[in-house]
Amino acid sequence: DAKTTQPPSMDCAEGRAANLPCNHSTISGNEYVYWYRQIHSQGPQYIIHGLKNNETNEMASLIITEDRKSSTLILPHATLRDTAVYYCIVRVAVRGTSGSRLTFGEGTQLTVNP
Amino acid sequence: NAGVTQTPKFRVLKTGQSMTLLCAQDMNHEYMYWYRQDPGMGLRLIHYSVGEGTTAKGEVPDGYNVSRLKKQNFLLGLESAAPSQTSVYFCASVSGRSYNEQFFGPGTRLTVL
């Protein structure tokens, strides 16, 4: 699985958009980009994933560059409850002996300030 | 649905003691995983299972054993606990049909003295 690089921490004002970058310059053509977050002491929570098209769901938007070497997770209106560590993960989404395993890095600590 | 549950939530062991952590899911998921998380670090995969009766090693399997006798349960065993195994343990599961979203349990906080 490709390695990802994220800033260790970011701050955002409540009500503003939070834009979390992720660099994955060695991503392969069949690897997806996944985002999870972990609110303090809880189990990680899935946010969104994508291959090459931009994606949006009720939680966030995922923007992937045309060359797929980087992506940005956007929380459109951050709230205090969005304070968490955000993990960007790339992997091949296939079943089999790999078991769709995830490899977590250290993520970005997002702090939403009032 | 309860989702993914873990038992116990907290445990303190002495070096050399053994214990079993239980993970249960009620979503009929094929794949299940055990991770550990040390302070300030991301999760690391210990063992995983792609189906009932099958298990495989992850990134950090030494000192742990697992069993998946029933599809809904995934057990993690520590035969002889060591202080280095002090950590928070998370279990997760994912459907074999839509293996995009892993569902995580609330975690087990283990301290080995």
Image: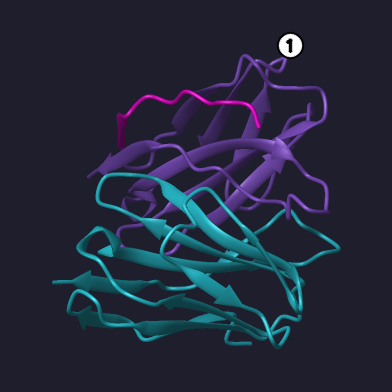
Chain colours: A purple, B cyan
The quadrant holding residue B94 is bottom right
Q: Relative to residue A4, is residue B107 drawn left or right?
A: left
Q: List the single residue furthest toward the top.
A: A67
Q: Residue at x 24, y 77 (%)?
A: B16
Location of residue A62 in the rendering, given as x and y in whole percent from the top left corner: 64, 34
- Position above or below: B58 against B9: above
Question: Label 1: how many residues lie within 10 Å, few (<14), some (14-19) or many (20+)?
Answer: few
Q: Residue at x 40, y 59 (%)?
A: B36
The quadrant holding residue A89 is top right
Q: Quadrant of the N terminus of chain A?
A: top right
The subunit carrying tag 1 is A
Residue range in magenta is A1-13
Q: Residue at x 78, y 53 (%)?
A: A97
- Position above or below: A60 against A9: below
Element marked by disc 1: loop
Q: How many marks?
A: 1
- The answer, for residue A77, to whether it is visible in the render is no
Location of residue B18 in the rendering, given as x and y in whole percent from the top left corner: 33, 83
- The answer, for residue A1, to whether it is visible in the render is yes
Location of residue A9 in the rendering, given as x and y in whole percent from the top left corner: 30, 31
Q: Relative to residue B22, is residue A93 drawn left or right?
A: right
Magenta highlight on residue A3: yes
At label 1, the amino acid type is Asp
Majority secondary structure of magenta residues: loop
Q: Nearer the viewer, residue B13 or A108?
A: B13
- Position above or below: A19 against B64: above
Q: Residue at x 36, y 84 (%)?
A: B19
Judging by the rendered image, the residue that carries numbered circle 1 is A67
Q: Relative to residue A10, is residue A71 drawn left or right?
A: right
